[in-house]
Amino acid sequence: MVSTQSVIDISSGLQYLPKSKDSVQESSPNQELLPLTAKVNNLDHLEIGRWDVPALVEKFGSPLYIVDEYTIRTACRQYRDTLKQHYPGESLVLYASKAWSSLAICALCGSEGLGIDVVSGGELYTAIEAGIKPNKIYFHGNNKSLAELTFAIETNCLIVVDNWLELETLAALKNKQKEQVNNLTKIMVRFTPGIECHSHEYIRTGHLDSKFGFDANQLNDVFAFISKEELISLIGIHAHIGSQIFEVQPHQDLADVMIDVMTTAMTHKLSIKEINIGGGLGIRYTEADDPPSIETWVHKVSTAMVDACQARQLPLPKLLCEPGRSIIGPACVTAYTVGSQKQIPEIRTYISVDGGMSDNPRPITYQSVYRAVVANRLSEASTEVVTIAGKHCESGDILIKNATLPVTQPGDCLVVMATGAYNYSMASNYNRLPRPAAVLVANEEVNVILQRETYQDLLSKDTLPERIAIFQN
């Protein structure tokens, strides 16, 4: 039997700190393992946004999501400003809020001039309550309910139409309202462009075998239908090819496909004013990950769109993109407290933390790989290989296999990096664990943006029929 400890990395957690930055060029957040403000302080503790991480855990408890405001703002600005720099037409960046939808995160992105991409009535409601203007909210989804479509019409956000049922339902709703409200509902049409990228099969959405969007060969019929609807205004087309993508070429190829579809719409006397090329830029979860920078991605996509329009002598449409993971993912870490340890000679050493698959379901769902550091001894050499286990009653509740760490003790503060995307948003109450708190750190300020759930919260929606309640006595 081969020992998992045959190779040990003797380096310390310091290796994961953001690389040095010069005065001219800011690091691209998606290329870093830790938030941009991360550093080691004089206590040998990890510090984020000028806040000592073990001290935050002592004050707010664990597990704890720690979100760095500076990293989020930097990513938003890099998308926004480089798009304006490299694309001569009008543009808009949308934050894909499914990555982390909450009042604070939506409002923060909105304050940087971004719109919001939502995929449910709940996300739409959150964006509205966060103060985002309806004309900057784009509503996606492959199975929007009648209630959700009605809500979208009432809020006057833009609806990204995904399929025939949705298009026909939307038309029926508008015609029913015609006598009461004679305003136009703006829509985009989503289609599958047939472009594949090398990412997990669950997050590839641009290939033909996908639940999302119209097939490209349906678009003539779709455009013909829309052209006859008086109360529906087609302003754009949308395609999304996947998530956690490190390749730029698929998005460059997408530009030609989108412009060809735009010309198809023109044959139906429809004017495409906006093109949304989706998002999907990957981030660095481990040292082996090497995603392109935000600026590189935006530059390549913008150039490809300009070239495609010039080749067909067409005016530039408004260009939209919708990053999510690359904005929020690198900005957050999750801090845990180390508990029990189990050594199995010649096989494995388990260390357990006070969270797991309920606050980070990605390892068990996508086989995602993360890195971790001991935040209260950041410079100490990593001298053992361990498997970091969660506390749930599930054998698959493993956060990181074969992590290289210093020798850990119960009570140590263990930090898992790059946990901003799809961790909180996919969190659950499995085993009736309350979901963690989240704090937003910025310079001298720390704010709780998500209250830690309590046992009372877990029961807040439970009901107990009277005929069963008697057995409580």
Image (cartoon, grey):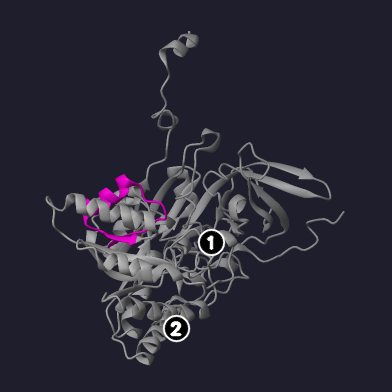
Question: Is disc 1 placed on a helix, strand or loop?
Answer: helix
Q: Is residue 379 left or right of residue 38?
A: right
- When the figure is inspected, residue 289 is found, relative to residue 427, above or below; the finding is below
* Residue 159 belongs to magenta span: yes
Q: Position of residue 257 (x, y in %)?
A: 44, 79
Q: Which residues are magenta?
A: 137-160
Q: Position of residue 233 (x, y in %)?
A: 23, 66
Q: Pointer 2: what residue?
A: 300
The residue at the point 64 percent across, 60 percent down is 380
Q: Residue furthest right?
A: 1
* Mark 1 touches mark 2? (CB < 8 Å): no
Q: Pointer 1: what residue?
A: 203
The residue at the point 35 percent across, 85 percent down is 86
Of residue 358 and residue 181, the one placed in the foreground of this image is 181
Of residue 454 and residue 166, the one placed in the foreground of this image is 166
Mark sitting earlier along the chain (1/2): 1
The residue at the point 36 percent across, 90 percent down is 312
Of residue 246 and residue 342, the one placed in the foreground of this image is 246
**Circle 1 crowding by C-alpha within 10 Å: few under 14, some 14–19, many from 20:** some
* Residue 49 belongs to magenta span: no
Snapshot quadrant of residue 265: bottom left
Snapshot quadrant of residue 452: top left
Q: Amino acid at mark 2?
A: Lys
Mark number for residue 467? none
Q: Position of residue 137 (x, y in %)?
A: 28, 60
**Circle 2 crowding by C-alpha within 10 Å: few under 14, some 14–19, many from 20:** some
Task: Tell which tag, 1 or 2, sits nearer the viewer.
Answer: 1
Q: Disc 1 versus disc 2: distance between alpha carbons? A: 22 Å
Q: Amino acid at mark 1?
A: Ile
Number of callouts in the render? 2
Q: Is residue 367 left or right of residue 49?
A: right
Of residue 406 and residue 98, the one placed in the foreground of this image is 98
